[in-house]
Each structure stands twice: as C-alpha cells, then as structure tokens.
Image (cartoon, helix red, strand yellow):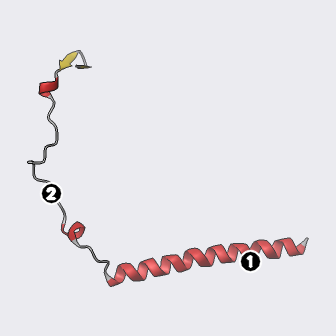
Amino acid sequence: METVEGQIIEEKDIIYDTPEQPKKECKTCKSKKLSKTHWIIMISSFYLLFASVYGTIKLINELINLF
C-alpha cells in the first residue's frame, strides 16, 4: 500500500494498462517506408556531418603546421 497525501491506495484501486484497452496509433506511425523527402534530408545531413568533421580535421592540421 502507498500513501498519497494522507490517503491509502490499495492494490485493487490501481488501474493497470491491459491488452484489451485499444491503443491509438497515428497514420504516420503505420507507414514503414521513408519518403523521398526523408531520404534527401538524411543524405544531406550526413553530408554536412562528415564535411564538418573533415573541415575540422583540416583546420586543426593547418593550425599545427603554423607552429
């Protein structure tokens, strides 16, 4: 038993999520494939990530060569 603000909650009073309760799903969650727009965004974001890492490495190498 748990006490909440002076009241006692018993095990029988707790409502658990049971399988018979229907779960709501949105339409976008049901689609398994990525759309063309999602692929373009993913490819461009990976390009930006790797370009920034490569540029940072080149910048550090140039700074090391200065000294």
Tell me the residue at 16%/37% (across/down). 16
Check disc 1 and give the amino acid type.
Answer: Lys
Tell me the residue at 23%/73% (across/down). 31
**Residue 20, above or below 14:** below
Residue in front for this viewpoint, 27 or 11: 11
Tell me if 2 is positioned left or right of 55 in this view. left
x and y percent of residue 38 in the render?
A: 36, 78
- Residue identified by numbered label 1: 58
- The disc, 1 or 2, on the residue closer to the chain's N-terminal end is 2
Q: Residue furthest front?
A: 19
Q: Residues within 10 Å of mark 2 (few under 14, many from 20)?
A: few
Q: Residue furthest right?
A: 67
Check disc 2 and give the amino acid type.
Answer: Lys
x and y percent of residue 57 in the render?
A: 72, 73
Residue in front for this viewpoint, 20 or 7: 20
Q: Quadrant of residue 39?
A: bottom left
Tell me if 29 is positioned left or right of 67 in this view. left
Q: Residue furthest top?
A: 6
- Residue identified by numbered label 2: 24
